[in-house]
Image: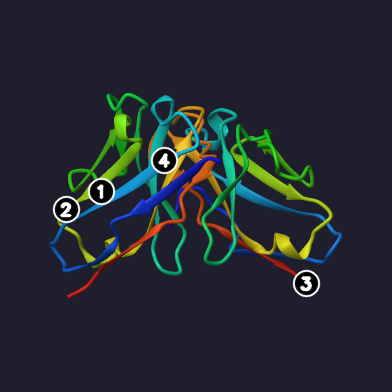
Protein backbone atom coordinates (compact mmCIF):
# COMPACT_ATOMS: atom_id res chain seq x y z
CA UNK A 1 0.00 0.00 0.00
CA UNK A 2 1.43 3.33 -1.11
CA UNK A 3 2.11 6.13 1.36
CA UNK A 4 0.36 8.40 -1.16
CA UNK A 5 -3.35 7.63 -1.02
CA UNK A 6 -5.57 8.06 -4.05
CA UNK A 7 -9.18 7.00 -4.50
CA UNK A 8 -9.25 3.69 -6.33
CA UNK A 9 -11.80 4.94 -8.85
CA UNK A 10 -13.74 8.04 -9.86
CA UNK A 11 -16.33 8.64 -12.52
CA UNK A 12 -18.02 11.54 -14.22
CA UNK A 13 -20.18 12.48 -17.16
CA UNK A 14 -18.88 14.12 -20.33
CA UNK A 15 -18.56 17.87 -19.92
CA UNK A 16 -18.51 17.69 -16.14
CA UNK A 17 -15.58 18.27 -13.80
CA UNK A 18 -13.99 16.03 -11.26
CA UNK A 19 -11.04 16.02 -8.90
CA UNK A 20 -8.62 13.24 -8.01
CA UNK A 21 -6.89 13.58 -4.65
CA UNK A 22 -3.49 12.37 -3.53
CA UNK A 23 -3.07 12.43 0.23
CA UNK A 24 0.30 12.05 1.85
CA UNK A 25 2.15 13.68 4.71
CA UNK A 26 4.20 16.74 5.56
CA UNK A 27 7.28 14.73 4.59
CA UNK A 28 6.13 14.36 1.00
CA UNK A 29 3.20 16.07 -0.72
CA UNK A 30 2.77 18.53 2.12
CA UNK A 31 6.40 19.51 2.24
CA UNK A 32 6.84 21.41 -1.01
CA UNK A 33 5.26 22.13 -4.38
CA UNK A 34 6.84 19.24 -6.23
CA UNK A 35 4.06 16.71 -6.75
CA UNK A 36 3.48 15.50 -10.29
CA UNK A 37 0.63 13.69 -12.04
CA UNK A 38 0.65 11.06 -14.79
CA UNK A 39 -2.05 9.72 -17.09
CA UNK A 40 -1.86 6.16 -18.37
CA UNK A 41 -4.14 4.65 -20.97
CA UNK A 42 -4.38 0.83 -21.11
CA UNK A 43 -1.32 -0.73 -22.69
CA UNK A 44 0.44 2.61 -22.99
CA UNK A 45 3.31 4.32 -21.20
CA UNK A 46 2.47 6.98 -18.61
CA UNK A 47 2.29 10.59 -19.74
CA UNK A 48 3.23 13.61 -17.62
CA UNK A 49 0.18 15.79 -16.97
CA UNK A 50 1.32 18.13 -14.24
CA UNK A 51 4.58 18.92 -12.46
CA UNK A 52 5.47 21.18 -9.55
CA UNK A 53 1.81 20.71 -8.49
CA UNK A 54 0.48 23.46 -10.76
CA UNK A 55 2.58 23.41 -13.93
CA UNK A 56 1.30 21.92 -17.17
CA UNK A 57 3.81 20.66 -19.75
CA UNK A 58 3.33 22.02 -23.23
CA UNK A 59 0.70 20.08 -25.11
CA UNK A 60 -1.42 19.22 -22.08
CA UNK A 61 -4.88 20.80 -22.39
CA UNK A 62 -5.76 23.50 -19.89
CA UNK A 63 -8.74 21.35 -18.87
CA UNK A 64 -6.22 19.75 -16.53
CA UNK A 65 -5.19 21.70 -13.46
CA UNK A 66 -3.34 20.97 -10.24
CA UNK A 67 -3.57 22.25 -6.71
CA UNK A 68 -2.36 21.47 -3.21
CA UNK A 69 -3.83 22.02 0.21
CA UNK A 70 -1.93 20.83 3.23
CA UNK A 71 -0.84 17.24 2.69
CA UNK A 72 -3.14 16.67 -0.29
CA UNK A 73 -2.38 17.33 -3.92
CA UNK A 74 -5.27 17.32 -6.36
CA UNK A 75 -5.76 16.98 -10.09
CA UNK A 76 -8.90 18.56 -11.50
CA UNK A 77 -10.21 17.69 -14.94
CA UNK A 78 -12.86 20.00 -16.32
CA UNK A 79 -14.99 19.43 -19.40
CA UNK A 80 -14.56 15.67 -19.18
CA UNK A 81 -14.04 13.90 -22.47
CA UNK A 82 -14.16 10.23 -23.36
CA UNK A 83 -10.42 10.20 -24.01
CA UNK A 84 -9.81 11.18 -20.39
CA UNK A 85 -10.79 7.66 -19.39
CA UNK A 86 -7.48 6.31 -18.04
CA UNK A 87 -5.50 5.61 -14.89
CA UNK A 88 -4.01 8.57 -13.04
CA UNK A 89 -1.03 8.52 -10.68
CA UNK A 90 0.47 11.14 -8.41
CA UNK A 91 4.19 11.12 -7.64
CA UNK A 92 6.31 12.83 -5.01
CA UNK A 93 9.57 12.65 -3.17
CA UNK A 94 9.14 11.55 0.43
CA UNK A 95 11.73 12.28 3.10
CA UNK A 96 10.76 9.02 4.82
CA UNK A 97 10.01 6.68 1.91
CA UNK A 98 12.06 7.95 -1.01
CA UNK A 99 10.22 8.50 -4.26
CA UNK A 100 6.60 7.38 -4.33
CA UNK A 101 3.75 6.92 -6.76
CA UNK A 102 0.24 6.97 -5.44
CA UNK A 103 -1.75 3.77 -5.79
CA UNK A 104 -3.49 5.06 -8.90
CA UNK A 105 -7.04 6.13 -9.73
CA UNK A 106 -9.13 4.71 -12.54
CA UNK A 107 -11.26 7.38 -14.18
CA UNK A 108 -14.42 6.27 -15.92
CA UNK A 109 -16.33 8.62 -18.19
CA UNK A 110 -19.98 7.65 -17.95
CA UNK B 1 11.63 13.99 -31.74
CA UNK B 2 12.58 12.98 -28.25
CA UNK B 3 12.48 9.23 -27.81
CA UNK B 4 13.41 6.53 -25.34
CA UNK B 5 13.46 2.88 -26.42
CA UNK B 6 13.89 0.11 -23.86
CA UNK B 7 15.23 -3.33 -24.68
CA UNK B 8 16.58 -6.41 -22.94
CA UNK B 9 13.43 -7.75 -21.34
CA UNK B 10 12.47 -11.40 -21.49
CA UNK B 11 11.87 -14.58 -19.55
CA UNK B 12 14.33 -15.39 -16.79
CA UNK B 13 14.38 -18.04 -14.06
CA UNK B 14 14.16 -17.10 -10.38
CA UNK B 15 17.59 -16.17 -9.10
CA UNK B 16 18.70 -15.16 -12.56
CA UNK B 17 19.93 -11.88 -13.97
CA UNK B 18 18.94 -9.56 -16.78
CA UNK B 19 20.32 -6.29 -18.13
CA UNK B 20 17.90 -3.73 -19.49
CA UNK B 21 18.90 -0.92 -21.80
CA UNK B 22 17.28 2.36 -22.77
CA UNK B 23 18.40 4.15 -25.94
CA UNK B 24 17.82 7.89 -26.01
CA UNK B 25 17.50 10.09 -29.07
CA UNK B 26 16.29 13.55 -30.01
CA UNK B 27 17.69 15.34 -26.96
CA UNK B 28 20.96 15.92 -25.17
CA UNK B 29 20.97 12.77 -23.05
CA UNK B 30 23.98 13.78 -20.97
CA UNK B 31 22.13 16.83 -19.60
CA UNK B 32 19.38 14.91 -17.82
CA UNK B 33 18.67 12.85 -14.77
CA UNK B 34 17.15 9.52 -15.80
CA UNK B 35 15.06 6.98 -13.94
CA UNK B 36 13.63 3.47 -14.09
CA UNK B 37 10.04 2.74 -13.14
CA UNK B 38 8.19 -0.57 -13.30
CA UNK B 39 4.61 -1.79 -13.34
CA UNK B 40 3.67 -5.30 -12.28
CA UNK B 41 0.76 -6.91 -14.17
CA UNK B 42 -2.49 -5.20 -13.18
CA UNK B 43 -0.71 -3.05 -10.59
CA UNK B 44 0.38 0.55 -10.21
CA UNK B 45 3.63 2.29 -10.99
CA UNK B 46 6.69 1.75 -8.80
CA UNK B 47 9.72 4.05 -8.93
CA UNK B 48 12.98 2.07 -8.88
CA UNK B 49 16.03 4.24 -9.39
CA UNK B 50 17.42 7.66 -10.36
CA UNK B 51 20.81 8.47 -11.85
CA UNK B 52 22.22 11.97 -12.24
CA UNK B 53 23.32 13.37 -15.58
CA UNK B 54 26.97 12.53 -14.91
CA UNK B 55 26.20 9.21 -13.24
CA UNK B 56 27.82 10.30 -10.00
CA UNK B 57 24.62 10.37 -7.94
CA UNK B 58 22.33 7.35 -7.73
CA UNK B 59 19.24 6.51 -5.70
CA UNK B 60 17.37 3.21 -5.35
CA UNK B 61 14.06 2.08 -3.96
CA UNK B 62 14.41 -0.22 -0.95
CA UNK B 63 12.78 -3.02 -2.94
CA UNK B 64 15.73 -3.22 -5.36
CA UNK B 65 18.62 -1.81 -3.33
CA UNK B 66 21.52 -4.24 -3.46
CA UNK B 67 20.06 -6.29 -6.34
CA UNK B 68 19.67 -3.73 -9.14
CA UNK B 69 22.34 -1.39 -10.51
CA UNK B 70 21.58 1.64 -12.65
CA UNK B 71 24.24 3.02 -14.98
CA UNK B 72 24.57 5.20 -18.04
CA UNK B 73 26.88 5.69 -21.00
CA UNK B 74 26.56 9.30 -22.10
CA UNK B 75 28.82 8.69 -25.10
CA UNK B 76 26.32 6.12 -26.38
CA UNK B 77 23.17 7.91 -25.15
CA UNK B 78 22.17 4.84 -23.21
CA UNK B 79 20.81 3.98 -19.79
CA UNK B 80 21.04 0.54 -18.21
CA UNK B 81 19.57 -1.46 -15.37
CA UNK B 82 21.43 -4.57 -14.24
CA UNK B 83 19.00 -6.80 -12.35
CA UNK B 84 20.30 -9.68 -10.22
CA UNK B 85 18.69 -12.22 -7.87
CA UNK B 86 15.38 -11.86 -9.64
CA UNK B 87 12.18 -13.18 -8.08
CA UNK B 88 8.63 -13.54 -9.32
CA UNK B 89 7.85 -10.19 -7.68
CA UNK B 90 10.14 -8.52 -10.22
CA UNK B 91 7.84 -9.54 -13.07
CA UNK B 92 6.74 -6.25 -14.62
CA UNK B 93 6.95 -3.83 -17.49
CA UNK B 94 10.06 -1.71 -17.00
CA UNK B 95 10.07 1.89 -18.21
CA UNK B 96 12.91 4.37 -18.48
CA UNK B 97 12.06 8.06 -18.19
CA UNK B 98 13.73 11.44 -18.42
CA UNK B 99 13.62 13.92 -15.54
CA UNK B 100 14.36 17.47 -16.67
CA UNK B 101 14.03 19.09 -13.26
CA UNK B 102 16.04 16.82 -10.97
CA UNK B 103 14.76 14.10 -8.63
CA UNK B 104 13.56 16.36 -5.82
CA UNK B 105 10.91 17.78 -8.14
CA UNK B 106 10.03 14.40 -9.65
CA UNK B 107 8.59 15.29 -13.01
CA UNK B 108 9.36 12.72 -15.71
CA UNK B 109 8.45 14.16 -19.06
CA UNK B 110 9.62 11.58 -21.62
CA UNK B 111 8.93 7.85 -21.22
CA UNK B 112 9.86 4.82 -23.22
CA UNK B 113 7.30 2.26 -24.34
CA UNK B 114 8.52 -0.27 -21.78
CA UNK B 115 10.14 -3.70 -21.88
CA UNK B 116 8.57 -6.74 -20.24
CA UNK B 117 10.44 -8.87 -17.72
CA UNK B 118 8.95 -12.19 -16.66
CA UNK B 119 10.54 -14.16 -13.85
CA UNK B 120 9.32 -17.75 -13.87
CA UNK B 121 10.67 -21.26 -13.72
Query: In the image, which disc is placed on residue A69?
Result: none
Q: Position of residue A38 (x, y in %)?
A: 58, 49
Q: Check residue A110 in the rendering and tell me which mark sits there, or answer none.
A: 3
In the image, which is nearer the foreground, mark 4 or mark 2?
Answer: 4
Q: Position of residue B73 (x, y in %)?
A: 28, 33
- On screen, A69 above or below A49? above
Q: CA distance from mark 4 to mark 2?
A: 24 Å
Whether label 3 touches label 2, CB < 8 Å: no
Whether residue A45 sits left or right of residue B86 in the image: it is right
Q: Position of residue A10 (x, y in %)?
A: 68, 63
The residue drawn where x is 58% and y is 40% is: A36
The chain letter under disc 1 is B
Quadrant (top left, top right, bottom left, bottom right) of the N terminus of chain A = bottom left
Front residue of this view, candidates B18 and A19? B18
From the image, tell me which residue sits under label 4: B24
Q: Chain of mark 2?
A: B
Q: Tell me the SS state at disc 4.
A: strand
Instruction: Report the Cα–Cα distance between label 3 and label 2.
Output: 45 Å
The crowd level at tag 2 (other Cα within 10 Å; few <14, some 14-19, many 20+) is some
- Mark 4 touching mark 3, by CB under 8 A? no
Distance between the Cα atoms at labels 1 and 3?
Answer: 39 Å
- The alpha-carbon separation of the residues under discs 2 and 1 comes to 9 Å
What is the distance, in whole Å, between disc 4 and disc 3 at their CAs?
39 Å
Instruction: Work out whether disc 1 and disc 3 sit on a shared chain.
Output: no
Label 3 element class: loop
Classify 10 Å Cα crowding around label 3: few (below 14), some (14-19), many (20 and above): few
Q: Chain of mark 3?
A: A
Q: Chain of mark 4?
A: B
- Residue B103, position in %: x, y? 44, 31
Badge 2 is on which residue? B84
Amino acid sequence: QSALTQPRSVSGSPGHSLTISCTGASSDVGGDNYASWYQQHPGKAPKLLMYDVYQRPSGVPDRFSGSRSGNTASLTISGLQSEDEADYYCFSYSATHGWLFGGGTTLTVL
Amino acid sequence: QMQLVESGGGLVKPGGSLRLSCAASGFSFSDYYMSWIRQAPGKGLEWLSYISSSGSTIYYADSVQGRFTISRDNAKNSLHLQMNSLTAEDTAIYYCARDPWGPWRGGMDVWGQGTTVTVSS
